[in-house]
Image: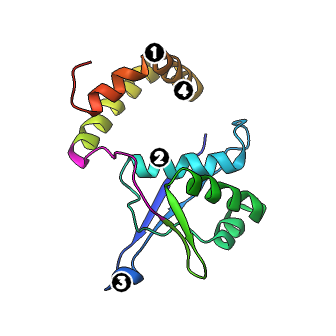
């Protein structure tokens, strides 16, 4: 499974100098097309609050050099993000995040991470490997009606 790594460099004094970087990782065994893996990682970073509107995504040539993939694959991913309204390309400067995806607040995220770590320890003790954990989470997500998640986000009772 791919991982998501964030390297943040906000040392610049003005907004034009500030960048937020995402380092992409690929899983060639996932069966998910490469461009979609890139899109999914940007979406995850947005949901977790690692990327914010105005942050710059890595330049195509940097992604190509880092992952040894075809530039058209990166361009396709960035076009998909543009189509979803999440990013936009600026000629001569790069691709920038335009909107967010309802990130979880940091205190909520910290609590969820603690709970998840405890749960993962229990899953490990029960003998589940990474693939077993993923299968259990995916099957459980499919069992929960989508409306439950959207109602919670709006503050309603599920």
Residue at image coords 59%, 50%: 39
User: Which is more N-terminal, label 1 or label 3?
Assistant: 3
Q: Which residue in the protein does label 4 denote?
A: 134
| Earlier-in-chain disc, 1 versus 2 | 2
* Nearer mark to the viewer, of 1 and 4: 4
The residue labelled by disc 3 is 12
Which residues are the magenta region? 97-107
- Measured in 3D between alpha carbons, the distance from the residue under mark 1 to the one under mark 2, in whole angstroms, is 28 Å
Say the numbered circle drawn on residue 44.
Answer: 2
Is the residue 9 above or below the residue 12 in the image? above
Could you tell me which secondary element the residue under label 4 belongs to?
helix
Q: Which residue is mark 1?
A: 126
* Residue 48 image point, x, y percent: 38, 48
Residue 95 visible: yes
- Image quadrant where one finds the C terminus: top left
Quadrant containing the N terminus in the rendered view: top right
Picture quadrant where residue 154 is located: top left
């Amino acid at each position: 499974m791919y991982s998501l790594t964030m390297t943040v460099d906000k040392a610049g004094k003005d907004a034009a100098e500030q960048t937020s970087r995402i380092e992409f990782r690929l899983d060639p065994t996932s069966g998910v097309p490469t461009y979609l893996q890139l899109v999914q990682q940007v979406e995850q970073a947005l949901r977790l609050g690692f990327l914010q509107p105005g942050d710059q995504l890595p330049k195509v040539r940097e992604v190509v050099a880092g992952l040894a993939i075809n530039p058209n694959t990166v361009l396709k991913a960035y076009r998909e993000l543009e189509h979803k309204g999440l990013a936009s390309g600026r000629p001569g400067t790069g691709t920038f995040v335009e909107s967010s995806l309802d990130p979880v607040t940091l205190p909520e995220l910290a609590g969820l991470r603690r709970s998840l770590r405890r749960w993962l320890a229990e899953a490990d003790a029960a003998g589940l490997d990474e693939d077993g954990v993923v299968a259990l989470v995916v099957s459980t997500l499919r069992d929960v009606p989508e409306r439950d998640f959207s109602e919670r986000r709006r503050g309603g009772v599920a």
